[in-house]
Image (cartoon, coloured by chain):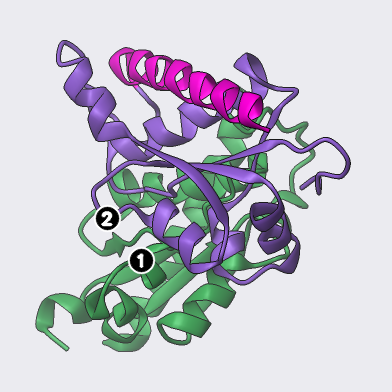
Amino acid sequence: MKVVTGKKKVIIIPCSGIGKAFGSISRDATYEVTENLRKDTTETLCLALLVSGDEKSLQLIRNNKCITVDGCPLQCAKKNVELAGGNLAANLRVVDAYKENRNLKPRNVTFLDPDGQQMALKLAEKIAEKVDDLLVEQ
Amino acid sequence: MTEAQEKKVGIISCSGEERVEGTISRVATRLVLEKLRPNETVTICLPLFLAGGREEREFARDYPTITVDGCDKKCAKIATERYSGKPTSSILVTDILKNYQCPLSSRRKLNDATLTVTRKVAERIAEEVDEVLRHRR
């Protein structure tokens, strides 16, 4: 993990969902933003590292604006960032992407099927737009 | 503990979004749940220990639990011990990878070579599931 110094970045934190396709979509959308769409202005971190109380992760989410991306209504990413005192700027939900793209029926969990990949790309575009908004505010 | 719980083993994977070893940990866990030991295993999303309720926090007390960690920070083991209960067994993916000379792929999409070692990790988890169940009988 790179600890951001100097110019601030937006930290994208997906949920760690392992039981449903929505968790996998959350993670894939996050990778699309941090590795392609906005790779110079964003980073991600392990949510489990945050949950385990890692000090560097805590500093990272407190010193930078965070976008959480949750797969299910339990909103683990959002709740854990809030509990850790993170600078939560926005929360996006896979279920909203699902409602907006009802033609897509993602099913596979372990390896996303084409519908799951497509939904992740659409969600990634939304996250990237939110990143831009937050950077303008800074 | 119910009869169903006595026959099941909980597997808790680290989320490991930052590293390919985290992806290996998650995918190996899914392979055990879906293919290798579907009738003997259950899982839980690790962050639910804090975000969920009592039922989630009692997971490691309700099930004999194996944690699977991608790196030596051992988030799954530490968080399970802190918020749920002492795991019965712990597996570290990097320990298993030492036995295989394999250039790893990106964290987002596993290439064929990385998928092969991921299956080895899954087999190791499945062996541990069998061992845990053997001791409970």
- Please name the amino acid that badge 2 sits on: Leu
The residues tagged by marks 1 and 2 sit, at their Cα atoms, a distance apart of: 7 Å
| SS state under label 2 | loop
| SS state under label 1 | helix
Chain A shade: purple
Vertical arrangement, residue B96 with respect to residue A29, above or below: below
Would you name the residue on which mark 2 appears? A74
Residue contact at pointers 1 and 2, CB within 8 angstroms: yes
- Which percent across, then down, holds residue B28? 48, 47
- Which percent across, then down, holds residue A46? 60, 51
The residue closer to the viewer here, A27 or B28, is A27
The residue closer to the viewer here, A9 or A109, is A9
**Chief SS of the magenta region:** helix
Would you name the residue on which mark 1 appears? B51
Vertical arrangement, residue B117 with respect to residue A134, above or below: below
Q: Which residue is at a point 51% across and 77% down the rendered structure image?
A: B89
Residue extending furthest toward the left: B3
Magenta region, residue range: A113-138
- Please name the amino acid that badge 1 sits on: Ala
Q: Which residue is at a point 25% across and 81% down the rendered structure image?
A: B54
Tell me the quadrant of the picture where the N terminus of chain B can be found.
bottom left
Callout 2: 10 Å neighbours few (<14), some, many (20+)? few
Q: Is residue A20 visible?
A: yes
